[in-house]
Amino acid sequence: MHPYTIKKAELPDLDFVAMLFDEYRVFYKQASDLDKARTFIQNRMKNNESVIFLAIERQSDNVIPVGFVQLYPSFSSVSMKKLWILNDLFVAPSARKKGIAKMLMETAKNYAVKTEAKGLILETAVDNDPAKKLYESMGYKKDVQCDHYEFIISSIEWGNDPKN
């Protein structure tokens, strides 16, 4: 029996997902804040604002969370279809190189097919070579036809200047 399984995360899984989500944010050089991570994930779950798949390892009677993927819904106006944003993918360092990221990616793909979506889109850091290698090995193509822009609204623009 394979020691790893993937399941759709539900509220009883909140603490497992929040712990992994906090580690994911630390990987992207954010300060650890487990309470805020828990609140953020709890809000996504309660409001059905994302779909999270959780990878777990079973060791005897223990269940150990080892990774997750989080999908956010979007839509393609041109194709008039749902589109999933694969926003977060994380595998705990102790569980890497065991095929878990690929299992999570396959689960996300199967979910996109099941929900009749146009597809999945994602982005990663330009220096995240292991992730890019995985995505390309699974058939993802780098978008060379579009430039992506962002406009970040700072807390000062919202009147939340920390100096006040």
Image: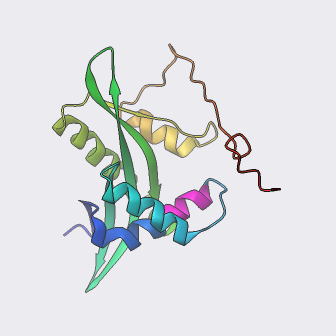
Q: Nearer the viewer, residue 1 or 27?
A: 27
Residue at figure coordinates x 43%, y 37% from the top left: 135
**What span is colored magenta in the figure?**
21-27
Residue at figure coordinates x 52%, y 17% from the top left: 144
Q: Is residue 130 left or right of residue 65?
A: right
**In the rendered image, which quarter is residue 12 located in?**
bottom left
| Vertical relation: 99 (above or below) 79 | below
| Vertical relation: 109 (above or below) 34 | above
Residue 113 in percent (x, y) is at 20, 35
- Picture quarter with the N terminus: bottom left
Answer whether residue 99 is visible to the viewer in this image.
no
| Vertical relation: 142 (above or below) 74 | above
Residue 105 in percent (x, y) is at 34, 46
- Which color scheme does this rendered protein use? rainbow
Residue at figure coordinates x 57%, y 58% from the top left: 25
| Vertical relation: 161 (above or below) 84 | below
> Which secondary structure type mostly characterizes the magenta part of the structure?
helix
Residue 101 in percent (x, y) is at 39, 52
**In the rendered image, which quarter is residue 115 located in?**
top left
Residue 126 in percent (x, y) is at 62, 36
**In the rendered image, which quarter is residue 134 located in?**
top left
Tally the numbered discs. Answer: 0
Q: Residue furthest bottom?
A: 61
Q: Nearer the viewer, residue 160 or 148?
A: 160
Q: Residue furthest right?
A: 163
Whether the magenta-drawn stretch holds residue 160 is answered as no
Q: Nearer the viewer, residue 1 or 9?
A: 9
Answer whether residue 36 is visible to the viewer in this image.
yes
Residue at figure coordinates x 65%, y 58% from the top left: 30
- Picture quarter with the C terminus: bottom right
